[in-house]
Amino acid sequence: DAATVERGKVLYVAKKCQICHSLEGKGGRVAGPLDDVGKRWKEDQLALFLTSPTKVHPRSAMPPTRILRLIGCEDRQVA
């Protein structure tokens, strides 16, 4: 929904995701764009990648995040 998308945009700036990722054509180019990421990734895959990127992509340079806690999903089980 629109509120969730807006909250994601706020976190994108607050967590400095724009250093590596782009959103709406603005930001970094080191990593993939985040436009429609929720449509490209299943929720459980995305949760795992955000908390443990190398479990999904062993050569990932992305640091692990605690973003699930920030969005109120800290109790979410990730494989």
Image: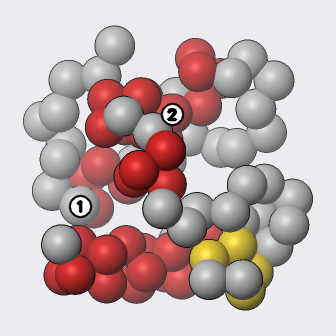
**Residue 67 position within the rendered picture, expressed as x and y whole percent measured from the top left:** 38, 54
User: Which label sits on residue 8?
Assistant: none
Q: Residue at x 73, y 86 (%)?
A: 26
**Residue 40 position within the rendered picture, expressed as x and y whole percent measured from the top left:** 49, 44
Q: Residue at x 19, y 43 (%)?
A: 74
Q: How many marks?
A: 2
- Which comes sooner in the sequence, label 1 or label 2? 2
Quadrant of residue 62 within the rendered picture: top right
User: Which label sits on residue 71?
Assistant: 1
User: Which label sits on residue 49?
Assistant: 2
Q: Nearer the viewer, residue 1 or 73?
A: 1
Q: Residue at x 73, y 55 (%)?
A: 32
Q: Residue at x 31, y 84 (%)?
A: 6
Q: How is the image coloured?
A: secondary structure
Q: CA distance from mark 1 to mark 2?
A: 15 Å
Q: Quadrant of the N terminus?
A: bottom left
SS at mark 2 in the image: helix
* Image vertical order of residue 76 relative to residue 21, above or below: above
Q: Quadrant of the C terminus?
A: top left
Decide if residue 7 is in sight here: no
The three-letter code of the residue at mark 1 reads Ile
Quadrant of residue 13 within the rendered picture: bottom right
The three-letter code of the residue at mark 2 reads Phe
Decide if residue 50 is in sight here: yes
* Image vertical order of residue 68 relative to residue 44, above or below: below
- Asked if labels 2 and 1 touch by Cβ distance under 8 angstroms, the answer is no
Mark 2 neighbour density, 10 Å: few (under 14) some (14–19) many (20 or more): many
Query: Does 28 sit left or right of 43 as displayed?
Result: right
Mark 1 neighbour density, 10 Å: few (under 14) some (14–19) many (20 or more): few
Query: Does 33 sit left or right of 28 as displayed?
Result: left
